[in-house]
Image: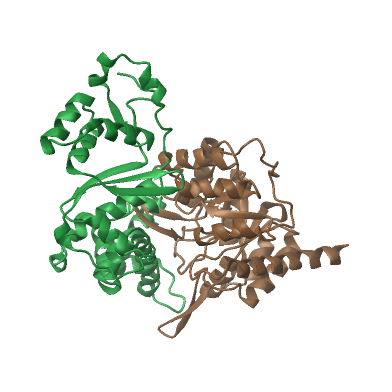
Amino acid sequence: MSGSATVKIPTRPIPASVGIGLRAPHTQNFLETRPAVDWVEVHSENYFGHGIPLDHLLEVRQHCPVSLHGVGLSVGSTDALDTDHLARLKALVGRVEPVFVSEHLSWSSVGGRYLNDLLPMPYTEEALAYLVGRVAEIQDRLGQRILIENISSYLQLVQSSIPEWDFLAELARLSGCGVLLDINNVYVSAANHGFDPYAYLQAVPVGAVEEMHLAGFTRKRVEGQEILIDTHNRPVHPRVWALYRAAVQRFGPTPTLIEWDADLPPLEVLVEEAARARVVMEVRDARAA
Amino acid sequence: MPGLREIQVGFAEALAGERAAEHFAPWIRANGLDGARRLRIYRNNSVATLSAALEAVFPVVRRLVGEAFFASVARAYVRACPSLSGDIHRYGDGLGAFLGTLPGTADHPYLVDVATLEWAYHEVFHTEPRTALDLTNLQGLSEDSYPELRFALQPAARLLASEYPVLRIWQVNQPSWPGEPCVDLSEGGGPVLVVRCGREIEMETLPWGEGAWLQALHRGSSLVAALERGLAVDPTFDLGPALARRIAQGVLLARGGTNAHA
């Protein structure tokens, strides 16, 4: 689809780059206004059929890099890997030439039934060994590395014997995948399970994090207990910004994405949030200089 | 200690039913909130995600039955028909048939067909078209071979039929429709063609004869056998213009490839 007039797009975002999750209602406006973001990320499955959305995405791709973020591969499932799903992802990778391909540290199906949600793994030695094999198989079949993202969770399994942060770090080390560190998810899970989100950051090796996500959460009260839900429907919370500053301090400037999926505001709001992330990275750079 | 498989099976069963949730709850760290309530968050998330997917695919059905009724239908459908793919856009193909089984929809006999039309639109929207047939390929063939030509329907096209004016119902229930959403059901139905043309989707109600002809071609009939089907339904069916139009529109492709052959 990309014609000969296509500008050469960098294959990796520059470290201090900021992006936004691009959703269908914003695409037209994005193409017309070309806001000041360095790349965009989309959900892989929305383009699997190579339908009309892909035509729009390939037009976007002529102006800025694109990353593909999957929500449906069910990486941690004990079902056989869905090779049809993976083949469709691979075909899409061939068309889009994304800067990153990412998936989640979670499972979403068993016995052939999909919950279409990101369900938490038990953090055990067995699960770690299993996931290392799955990620390796996915990377083999795709012919490229992927990033794995930490999820927000609302329960912990009693079988878990490894802290999530160590599990994630070991998965990256043993499988060779990169880490997509979702700062909001760290904050949400820390609040829900009562651990220190800053300790989480300290446990993740500096070289492992290749992308970060920022998003908004919603507070919900259940039986007097407050639970944070990863809703992606509002601005990044001030405490998540604070955690992000600490993350940038530790990991250095890292491609950072603003995600917003529900109750979409005007495109400019996402662009302003992305600009805030850029300032955080620039301040860090200025201090380091 | 249960292994990963056992945990995942138990988790999924717990999300499907409250009883199984009681068995699974002891495997969840209470930590200030009991396991059953934590599971309910996931159950709600999953139902909300799948319901939102159905809302996105069936906006006209939703408008016809009302948001509250649609929400209850969606919840019932999610319980009855689990998702079978990590690609959520594949979810909902059975909603039309499911609607037909519900007692509350008897007053709207056209609902099932409207759902079928919305699903067809959804599939076409998410399908890459194959290159249209080049008419010059046909010109190279001898006229003797025309009767035995076989065509395929464009992958980014769907043909359906209804006794009701479903396309009119669809059109007047678009947000952009300027007038009242009223349709005279007695105007009758017909075959409806849904086809992707570039970044647009074209929809059109066909005469019954042309619909029968196109359906026969789609099922693999030769041009002459399909013509007989069309004429049997409507003796006034005119093959020439229909064939030229559907080839030019990219609806008809050569069977088995992008080049025409007998």
Q: Is residue B235 left or right of residue B44?
A: left
x and y percent of residue A97 in the render? 60, 41
User: For this rendering, which residue is in front, A19 or A152?
Assistant: A19
Quadrant position of residue B81: bottom left
Residue A75 shows in this picture = no
Q: Is residue A137 left or right of residue B68?
A: right
User: For this rendering, which residue is in front, B64 or A143?
Assistant: B64
Is residue A105 depicted above or below B233 in this figure? below
Is residue A282 depicted above or below A129 in this figure? below
Q: Residue at x 50, y 38 (%)?
A: A91
Q: Is residue A206 left or right of residue B255?
A: right
Q: How are the residues colored?
A: by chain
Q: Residue at x 46, y 69 (%)?
A: A154
User: For this rendering, which residue is in front, A56 or B44?
Assistant: A56
Q: Residue at x 50, y 46 (%)?
A: A54
Find chain A in the image and tell me its colour: brown
User: Which quadrant is the C terminus of chain A positioned in?
Assistant: bottom right
How many numbered marks, from 0 up? 0
x and y percent of residue A255 in the render? 69, 56
Find chain B in the image and tell me its colour: green
Residue A266 shows in this picture = yes
Quadrant position of residue A140: top right
Is residue A160 depicted above or below A174 in this figure? below
Quadrant position of residue B35: bottom left
Q: Is residue B53 left or right of residue A136?
A: left
Q: Residue at x 69, y 74 (%)?
A: A242
Q: Residue furthest bottom?
A: A224
x and y percent of residue B92 in the render? 30, 55
User: Which quadrant is the N terminus of chain A positioned in?
Assistant: top right
x and y percent of residue A133 in the render? 51, 42
